[in-house]
Image: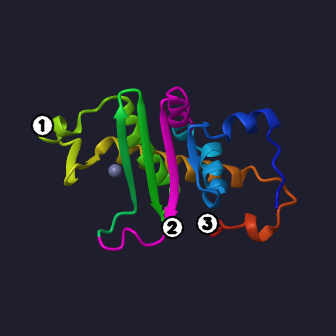
């Protein structure tokens, strides 16, 4: 596989999760790729790093959403005003670029003190999906933006690939004119 040519300093800065976001080991390589490619995701991480009173744990689960069809769920607890604990569960087969970003945005909504109960009755940006469960336009938009950045950045990378890359990996464009 192609060796990365990015400088080590840049790599370290852009591919590290904040210490208060802990991701299950299996998921780490994919999350590092998202960090590398998505400025929106890096901004989410920067904001979480700036809120050390927030603790996020992310794990994969193969089955828990079968009955309801959810692909990701966050359980967020605020036992004290200056302590927030979020447990994010992603379905194993889900795209973490969409769904981890989506769930981290729900955590940031809490950091921003979004009042879901009040907003759900008044706006179309927040709506109820169960008792004490809400969905927001904001989280959906961020998930879509991060997925888009990951896709675009990888397409860009493909064009910049050095010549020694095997032809089978480079030539995926239709050359008919
Ligand atoms: Zn959501």
Which residue is labeled 2 in the image?
92
Horizontal and vertical percent for residue 162?
83, 53
Quadrant occupied by the C terminus: bottom right
Pick the front one: 86 or 111? 86
Residue 77 left/right relative to 149 = left
Q: Is residue 54 above or below residue 64?
A: above
For label 1, the SS is loop
Looking at the image, which residue is at 39% across and 51% down? 74
Tell which circle, 1 or 2, labels the residue nearer the N-terminal end: 2
Pick the front one: 160 or 54? 54
Pick the front one: 98 or 75? 75
Residue 48 image label: none
Which residue is labeled 3 in the image?
177
Horizontal and vertical percent for residue 137?
29, 44
Q: Look at the numbered disc 3 and say if its residue's Cβ is closer than 8 Å to ligand 1.
A: no
**Would you identify the image quadrant in which residue 69 lies?**
bottom left
Q: Look at the numbered disc 2 and say if its residue's Cβ is closer than 8 Å to ligand 1.
A: no
Instruction: Give the spatial CA distance, label 3 vs label 2.
Output: 40 Å
Residue 129 visible in the snapshot: yes
Q: Look at the numbered disc 1 and say if its residue's Cβ is closer than 8 Å to ligand 1.
A: no
Horizontal and vertical percent for residue 49?
55, 31
> Looking at the image, which residue sits at the far right?
164
Tell which circle, 3 or 1, labels the residue nearer the N-terminal end: 1
Q: Is the residue under label 2 in contact with that under label 1 (CB below 8 Å)? A: no
Instruction: Give the spatial CA distance, label 1 vs label 2.
Output: 35 Å
Looking at the image, which residue is at 70% across and 55% down? 158
Pick the front one: 166 or 99? 99
> Looking at the image, which residue sits at the far front?
79
Which residue is labeled 1 in the image?
122
For label 3, the SS is loop
Instruction: Give the spatial CA distance, label 3 vs label 1.
Output: 53 Å
Residue range in magenta is 42-67
């Amino acid at each position: 596989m192609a060796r990365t040519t990015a400088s080590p300093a840049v790599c370290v800065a852009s591919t590290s999760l904040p210490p208060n976001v802990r991701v299950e080991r299996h998921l780490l390589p994919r999350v590092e790729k998202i960090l590398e490619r998505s400025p929106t995701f890096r901004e989410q991480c920067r904001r979480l790093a700036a809120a050390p009173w927030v603790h996020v744990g992310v794990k994969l689960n193969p089955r828990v959403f079968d009955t309801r069809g959810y692909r990701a769920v966050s359980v967020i607890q605020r036992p004290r005003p200056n302590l927030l604990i979020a447990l994010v569960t992603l379905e194993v087969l889900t795209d973490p670029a969409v769904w981890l970003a989506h769930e981290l945005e729900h955590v940031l909504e809490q950091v921003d003190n979004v009042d879901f109960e009040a907003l759900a009755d008044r706006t179309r940006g927040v709506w109820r999906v169960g008792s004490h469960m809400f969905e927001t336009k904001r989280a959906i938009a961020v998930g879509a933006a991060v997925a888009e950045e990951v896709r675009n950045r990888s397409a860009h990378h493909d064009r910049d690939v050095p010549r020694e890359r095997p032809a089978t990996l480079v030539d995926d464009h239709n050359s008919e004119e």
